[in-house]
Amino acid sequence: MASERRRAQWRAGSKRYQAKHAVRRNVVRSAQLAEVTTRYDPLPALPTTLTIPGPAHGLKIAVITDAQVRPGVPINHLAACGRYLTEIRPDVIVCIGDFADMPSLSTYEAPGSLTSEGTRYAEDVAAVKAAMTTFLTPIRAVKDWKPELILTLGNHEDRITRAINSDPRRLQGVMSLKDLGYEEAGWKVYPFLQPVVIGGVCFAHYFPSGPMGRPITTARQILHKMHMSCFAGHLQGRDIAYAKRADGTSLTAIISGSFYQHNEDYLSPITNQHWRGMVVLNQVKDGEFDEMCISVDYLLRKYA
């Protein structure tokens, strides 16, 4: 009888555990989908084409992928990257979005949880500003070189806009995208999912597709749907695809969204083992370029 009671108690406890965690998974999954679904947002505008003067053979563009800065994570690779860029001196630096993580505004944590209550907006903003200063200080020290600074906002920066829209009476005027200090630091900032074309290459944090507006997840699919050379962040690791038009013009699509040293709590030890780094596009002209992938490990070993 006692063993039967224990089995019954175990079964009841197991069902409660499964039900609790099923609800948790559903909450997190709904939040994840909401953050990368643009169905209820205004459609992204047509690409903005920027004309930036450069050499006849094409521009040199350095792309800073998702840094996802938050309090407590190492940022010395950003200083190393700044020093590296002073050596190669690109004409343009593009930050592809999610330079900021903004965990204080994450909807992945249940309201009232230890994680959501323990994070603070002001601390997030201060960490982002400090990291941006760390990155730009070596660049600003060079007197005869002033690259164009272009930043396309990501879904993590867009958490600020979503938070304001969810509670405008309380948050309008209290927080703003300007709190991050991007414009003040010298960046030309473009809205979340606003594509920007430079040298025939389209840059955006990600490229939405389908009725729900979710991210295209492979470089091959970007070429298939966008029909031009593109660069996107958002997804961890590195994915590159190539194609040719009928006139022989080369097309290249790159997805690279991880320029940080820390591991993400929501990923497993295996899925955290992805490539991390930034990318330099050489001789960018009419959508063609030669890419050069620079890992975080290389930057730290050579320039830290």
Image (cartoon, grey):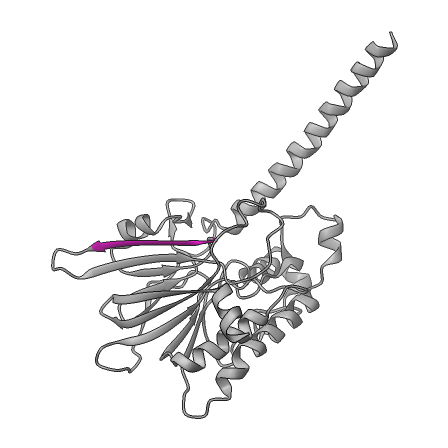
Above or below, 13 against 217 in this view is: above
Above or below, 41 against 21 in this view is: below
Rendering coords of residue 101 (x, y %): 59, 61
Q: Along the line of sight, which residue is nearer the eye, 275 or 66?
A: 275
**Residue located farthest toward the bottom when viewing the structure as drawn:** 143
- For the record, the magenta segment spans 236-243
Above or below, 214 against 259 in this view is: above
Quadrant of residue 105 in the image? bottom right
**Rendered-image quadrant of the C terminus:** bottom right
Q: Is residue 204 left or right of residue 115?
A: left
Above or below, 75 against 24 in this view is: below
Q: Which residue is found at the position 66% from the left and 34% from the top?
A: 23
Rendering coords of residue 55 (x, y %): 25, 82
Examine the structure image and report whether residue 220 is included in the region drawn in magenta: no
Q: Which residue is found at the position 44% from the left and 78% from the top?
A: 85
**Residue located farthest toward the left when viewing the structure as drawn:** 247
**Rendered-image quadrant of the N terminus:** top right
Q: Is residue 3 visible?
A: yes
Quadrant of residue 206 in the image? bottom left
The count of marks equals: 0
Q: Along the line of sight, which residue is nearer the eye, 175 or 150?
A: 150
Q: Is residue 184 visible?
A: no
Q: Is residue 122 left or right of residue 62?
A: right
Q: Along the line of sight, which residue is nearer the eye, 125 or 7?
A: 7
**Residue located farthest toward the front when viewing the structure as drawn:** 301
Q: Which residue is found at the position 77% from the left and 24% from the top?
A: 13
Rendering coords of residue 24 (x, y %): 66, 38
**Residue located farthest toward the top when viewing the structure as drawn:** 1
Q: Main secondary structure of the magenta part?
A: strand
Rendering coords of residue 67 (x, y %): 53, 64
